[in-house]
């Protein structure tokens, strides 16, 4: 399968092409979903939801992919996260009506909100951003990231190092 194109066989719904697509991008979808939902049963269900969404309505969503806007891996990651968030919202909304929860269980300690740093868009490449998110937001190790992205572990370490060098240089000039 070409790196950033979708074969016609996939869009025609041929099983062999779909199986190859799932084998190639399955790990990436699981990693993206795991970043949104931590519980294993939810990860499995939401991963399935992602693939159902990609192939429903005669692959309508897959047909909307534009290789001039993002790599296929980046686009699939965005679709997976979006689908997982939507699925979690639906499931949480159905879970328990607020009136059924005793007031004592609703009390929470105040928590200071954590704000993510706003970085210039061009500072890091999409791959560097994804690797940093997997390392720090999702607590994945280098081997897991390499498997999820289909790259060598040394490539993950190298991209991490280069991203950190860029971030250090950026924040030295900001201070």
Image (tube, rainbow, N blue to C red):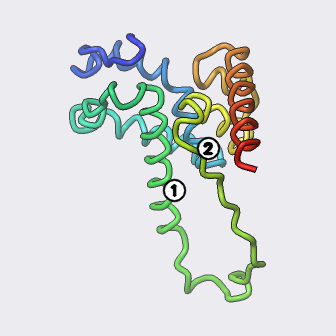
Number of other residues with Cα within 10 Å of mark 2, as a class: few under 14, some 14 to 19, many 20 or more:
some
Residue 105 x %, y %? 72, 81
Please, what secondary structure does the residue beneath circle 2 have?
Answer: loop
Please, what secondary structure does the residue beneath circle 1 have?
Answer: helix
Number of other residues with Cα within 10 Å of mark 1, as a class: few under 14, some 14 to 19, many 20 or more:
some
Residue 29 x %, y %? 51, 33
Question: Counting residues from the N terminus, which is met first, the one under dot 1 or under dot 2?
Answer: 2
Residue 6 x %, y %? 32, 19
Q: State the residue in front, 142 or 21.
A: 142
| CA gap, disc 1 and disc 2 | 12 Å
Query: Where residue 70 is drawn, which disc sits there?
Result: none
- Residue at 74% x, 79% y is 108
Front disc: 1 or 2: 2
Q: Label 1: which residue?
A: 88
Q: Say which quarter of the image contains residue 101.
A: bottom right
Q: State the residue in front, 19 or 129.
A: 129
162 displayed left or right of 63: right
- Residue at 40% x, 30% y is 70
Q: State the residue in front, 15 or 109.
A: 109
In the image, is residue 134 above or below residue 146?
below
- Residue at 32% x, 17% y is 15
Residue 51 x %, y %? 40, 34
Quarter of the image with the N terminus in it: top left
Q: State the residue in front, 59 or 172.
A: 172
Q: Label 2: which residue?
A: 35
Which residue, as the protein is rendered here, is positioned at the far bottom? 103
26 displayed left or right of 13: right
- Residue at 66% x, 60% y is 115
Q: Say which quarter of the image contains residue 132.
A: top right
94 displayed left or right of 18: right
């Amino acid at each position: 399968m070409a790196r950033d194109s979708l074969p016609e066989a996939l869009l025609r719904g041929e099983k062999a092409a779909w199986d190859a697509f799932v084998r190639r991008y399955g790990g990436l979808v699981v990693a993206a979903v795991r970043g949104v939902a931590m519980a294993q049963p939810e990860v499995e269900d939401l991963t399935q939801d992602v693939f159902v969404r990609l192939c429903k309505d005669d692959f309508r969503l897959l047909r909307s992919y534009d290789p001039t806007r993002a790599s296929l891996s980046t686009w699939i990651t965005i679709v997976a996260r979006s689908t997982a968030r939507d699925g979690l919202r639906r499931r949480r909304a159905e879970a328990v009506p607020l009136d059924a929860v005793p007031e004592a269980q609703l009390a929470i300690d105040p928590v200071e909100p954590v704000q993510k740093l706003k970085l210039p868009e061009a500072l890091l490449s999409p791959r560097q951003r994804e690797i940093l998110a997997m390392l720090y937001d999702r607590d994945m190790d280098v081997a897991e990231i390499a498997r999820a992205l289909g790259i060598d572990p040394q490539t993950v370490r190298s991209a991490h190092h280069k991203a950190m060098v860029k971030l250090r240089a950026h924040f030295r000039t900001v201070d």
